Image: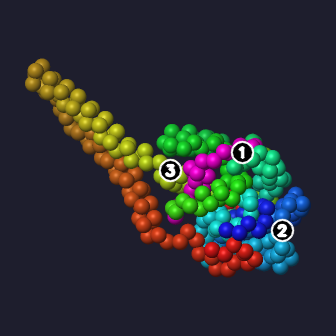
Amino acid sequence: MVICVKLSIIVPSYNEEGNLEELYRTIHSVLKTIDYEVIFVNDGSTDKTKNELDDLYNKHDKHVRVINFSRNFGKDAAIYAGLEHVTGEYCAIIDADMEQHPKYLLDMYNFLEENNDYDQVAMTIKKRKSGSAISRLGGKLFYKLINKLSDIHFAEDASDFRMFRSYVKDAILSLPEKNRFSKGIFNWVGFNTKYMQYDVGTRLNGKSKFTFKRSIKYAFEGIISHSTKPLRLATIFGIISAISGFVYLMYIVIKTIIMGIDTPGFPTIVCLIMLIGGIQLITIGILGEYIAKTYLEVKNRPIYIAKEKKGIKNTK
Ligand code: UDP
Ligand code: MG
């Protein structure tokens, strides 16, 4: 890869009309002394995002690059596409909605310039945005659970807002998986990471794409893509239910044969069938999730399809 600029900034953008011009203006005012490029990845937006990006490109083609996807592939695919096309010595990822203020880009940049022993700066959320108590509790539980289940550590309140050196980017791209859970991948590749805190701003226009339902699905996918421990649950459930079954059998034998007390068993049988049936279905379901993921990986489809690229220097 040819290094052309000092800093590349990737902006995954899905239905972000009304935000991009302001974001670019702020990035430019913060970074005007640095040689930078901004790669906007339009993730199949259905609003005016594309037109706004065309305008930005026409006005500022020195700094602006645009990749238009053929449809919505998801934020992680957009990040991947950006990473494939950056030319910077450093690379950063920032949301399009101004919740992550570009002023922090300068803090991260200065830190990496001054601290050669660090490879990556990751931003963690200082003040949780005014989400509901349930979603905050959900977030906390997710990090507790994923840290228990996975071999790598996930920093609580970590985001995709970060900056890293180009060899970290190469390491991230070297992971061939199609189902990309970026937060996990950033952790998995390792490297010396500095955590800094940022205050979440308010979204300029539009609304969050991560609804409660989508966040649960996302959390679930994060666990499945970064841990195989749920598969072991089947074995654990099996052992527990076999041991309890055996103990119960002994109890019935002693009660009926030795003590001569007759035991009517209908309710017990119904309860046990439901319990064991439930456990079996859960474990089959978990197995199914992993098989589905394997199926999707084996198909080996591309992570995204780009319809159009503008100003891109690093063509893969
Ligand atoms: N995003 C994307 N593709 C999607 C969903 C979101 O590129 O399918 C982008 C979105 O445009 C934004 C960033 O990912 O720049 C974060 O999304 P959002 O603000 O909706 O999420 P939240 O901040 O609520 O976590
Ligand atoms: Mg947001």
Q: Quadrant of residue 155?
A: top right
Residue found at the very far top of the displayed protein: 259
Q: Is residue 301 visible?
A: yes
Q: Tag 3: residue type? A: His
Q: Which residue is mark 3?
A: 226
Q: Residue at x 77, y 45 (%)?
A: 115
Tell me the tag on residue 10.
Answer: none
- Looking at the rendered structure, the secondary structure element under dot 3 is helix
The magenta region covers 178-198
Tell me where residue 265 appears, x and y as whole percent: 19, 35
Image height of 100 relative to 59, above or below: above
Image height of 42 relative to 102, above or below: below
Q: Which residue is mark 1?
A: 117
- Looking at the rendered structure, the secondary structure element under dot 2 is helix
Report the mark closest to the observer, 2 or 3.
3
Image height of 269 relative to 70, above or below: above
Q: Residues within 10 Å of mark 1 (few under 14, many from 20)?
A: few
Residue 25 belongs to magenta span: no
Which residue is at the front of the view, 279 or 175?
A: 175
Q: Is mark 2 within 8 Å of ligand 1?
A: no
Q: Tag 1: residue type? A: Asp
152 left or right of 122 in image: left
